[in-house]
Structure formats: structure tokens, C-alpha cells
Image (cartoon, rainbow, N blue to C red):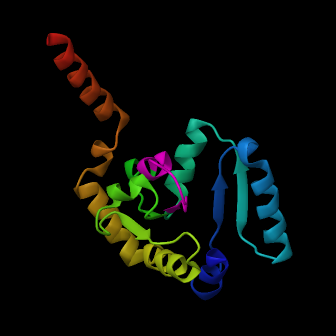
Amino acid sequence: MAYQRFRAEHAPRATLLLVGDYRCTERYHLALRELIERRAITGIRFTGQVSEEELEACFRAASVLVTLSAHEGLCLPVLEALAAGKPAITTRYNGAADFLGEGEYGITIDEPTDIQALADALQRLCDPKQQQQFCQRIEADRVFEQVSIRRHVAELIKIYRGIRRR
């Protein structure tokens, strides 16, 4: 696993938070837990479902968001991470990769199974100097405004009003 390699080579005290509700992916969740136990991987914490406040705390505590979906139209956690001022790592299959720009706000890897590419991306984004640069760019470009729900609602209202006037 990329996390295991990253932790062994670069950040032995790192913690991987796996946040979310596992009811829809229970078999995957159980298989993942078995794999972690079988390989004796440490530093992984499953949170289960969290409240909005707890989710915000997770983003504040995080260095980076990693989501490796192989087929997702628009992954909201990437947008939530950017709104929280955090960089993200995702795959080219994730529609939210477009929000990361050309490496300005995070890293897009080609394949979710490319362990070395993920380990390299983790090393880059968890390096304090690099992370600070990503976070400063996110803040300077006011990315949180671009991905905020308020902005999107305001844009939809404008569209609806334009249609209604016709």
C-alpha cells in the first residue's frame, strides 16, 4: 500500500483517517480492515460516519485529502478539502481533478492502483514547505469561493431568473 510505503520512508508518525459511512460499502470496508490487519499496517483510523463539525475538524487536522475513485463524476470531498484550504490527491477519473488545476491545488495521478505515484504525491504534499506553498496558493486564489455552495446556489438562481424572464 502507498500509505504504508509513505509512512515507512517519510512520516513514521503519520495517521491515515478513513472518514465516512461504510453501510453502502460494508464488504469493501471489511476486506480493507482484514488487509490492514494481515499486513500489520499501523497508523490508520476509521472514523465511521461523522457530524459536520467533526468533518470540519478532520479537514483542519489533515495535511492532504486523498480520494482514489476509479469512476466518479464529481467527488465532493475534493471540493470540501479545497474549501477548507487543503490540497488533494485524486485520479484522472475523478471529475473534481479539474479543480486541482495543473498541480496548483493538488496532484492528479493517472491510475488509482499506481502505488509509487501515490506515495510520491503524498511525500510532495506532506512536505511542510510544499504543503505551505499549496495552501498559500489555495488561499491566495480564493479557491474556497470558487467551490463554495453559496456561490453555486447564487449562480443557479441567476440562471433560473434568466430563464424565467424569457
Of the 4 image quadrants, the one containing the N terminus is bottom right
Q: Residue furthest top?
A: 165
Magenta span contains residue 79: yes
**Looking at the image, which residue is at 45% across and 72% down?**
110
**Looking at the image, which residue is at 41% across and 68% down?**
108
Where residue 21 appears, as percent x and y from the top left, is: 69, 43
Where residue 98 appears, as percent x and y from the top left, is: 33, 57
> Please, is residue 161 above or below residue 64 in the view?
above
> Please, is residue 46 above or below residue 116 in the view?
above
**Looking at the image, which residue is at 49% across and 64% down?**
63
Q: Report whether 13 appears left or right of 164.
A: right
Where residue 26 appears, as percent x and y from the top left, is: 78, 48
Q: State whether residue 13 appears in this view.
A: no
> Please, is residue 19 above or below residue 53 in the view?
below
Q: Report whether 46 appears left or right of 53.
A: right
Residue 124: quadrant of the picture: bottom left
Give the magenta-colored segment's residue range: 65-80
Where residue 41 appears, as percent x and y from the top left, is: 76, 75
Q: Nearer the viewer, residue 26 or 151?
A: 26
Residue 154: quadrant of the picture: top left
Q: Report whether 52 appears left or right of 73.
A: right
Q: Nearer the viewer, residue 50 or 121?
A: 121
Q: Residue furthest left?
A: 166
